[in-house]
Image (tube, grey):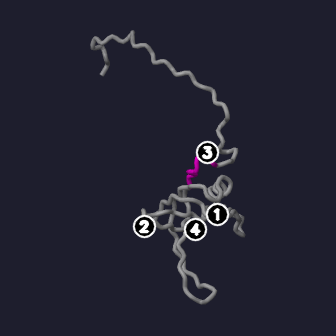
Amino acid sequence: MTKVFLIGNLTRDPELSETAGGVTVCRFAVAVNRGYGENRATDFYNVTAWRRLGEQVAQYTKKGNKIAVYGDLQIRQYEANDGSRRTSVDVIAQDVEFLTPKQQQGDDFYDAPATQPSAAPKKKPALEAFDDDGDIPF
């Protein structure tokens, strides 16, 4: 079993489509930074999200948004146009969490109401009726 957990930014807007059988699929790419200082590098991962998860990613994210992806690695080999054999590593998403702060989303789904009712703090019940005479049942 191979699992992967990535945190990074979308490199392009998610692309939502349907298979010939009518199943929704969303494809997107995530840039993940690794290392520090002179050793800093960026890795790019192709991610596929199916059905409702894919629909949510397409609806609520866009290029530049920070997301966390949890899923399976899928390695496939194919023949390129020039006849060479190539290997592709893809992530099949099982869960995606949107990490871009709400105020940066610009989408009504994420925007908090302009005014929120302030809840008065609840008072703790008085402990006057409690007398410490050893009648505690435990």
The alpha-carbon separation of the residues under discs 1 and 4 comes to 11 Å
Q: Residue at x 58, y 50 (%)?
A: 100
| Location of residue 132 with respect to 45 vertically, above or below | above
Q: Amino acid at mark 1?
A: Arg
Q: Residue at x 51, y 58 (%)?
A: 7
Q: Amino acid at mark 2?
A: Glu
- Residue highlighted by disc 3: 102
Magenta-drawn stretch contains 135:
no
Name the side, left or right, on which 66 lies relative to 5: right
As drawn, the residue found furthest toward the left would be 134
Name the side, left or right, on which 35 lies relative to 66: left
Per the image, label 2 sits on a secondary structure element best described as: helix
Find residue 127 and report its image quarter. Answer: top left
| Location of residue 19 with respect to 70 vertically, above or below | below
- Residue highlighted by disc 1: 12
Name the side, left or right, on which 132 lies relative to 81: left
Magenta-drawn stretch contains 99:
yes
- Labels 2 and 3 touching (C-beta < 8 A): no
- Residue highlighted by disc 4: 46
Mark before the other along the chain sequence, 1 or 3: 1
Q: Amino acid at mark 4?
A: Asn
Q: Amino acid at mark 3?
A: Lys
As drawn, the residue found furthest toward the front would be 38
Per the image, label 3 sits on a secondary structure element best described as: helix
Disc 2 packing (10 Å; few <14; some 14–19; many ≥20): few
Q: Residue at x 31, y 19 (%)?
A: 137
| Location of residue 76 with respect to 70 vertically, above or below | below
The alpha-carbon separation of the residues under discs 4 and 3 comes to 25 Å
Mark before the other along the chain sequence, 1 or 4: 1
The alpha-carbon separation of the residues under discs 1 and 3 comes to 19 Å
| Viewer-side label of 4, 2 | 2
Residues rendered magenta in the picture: 96-104
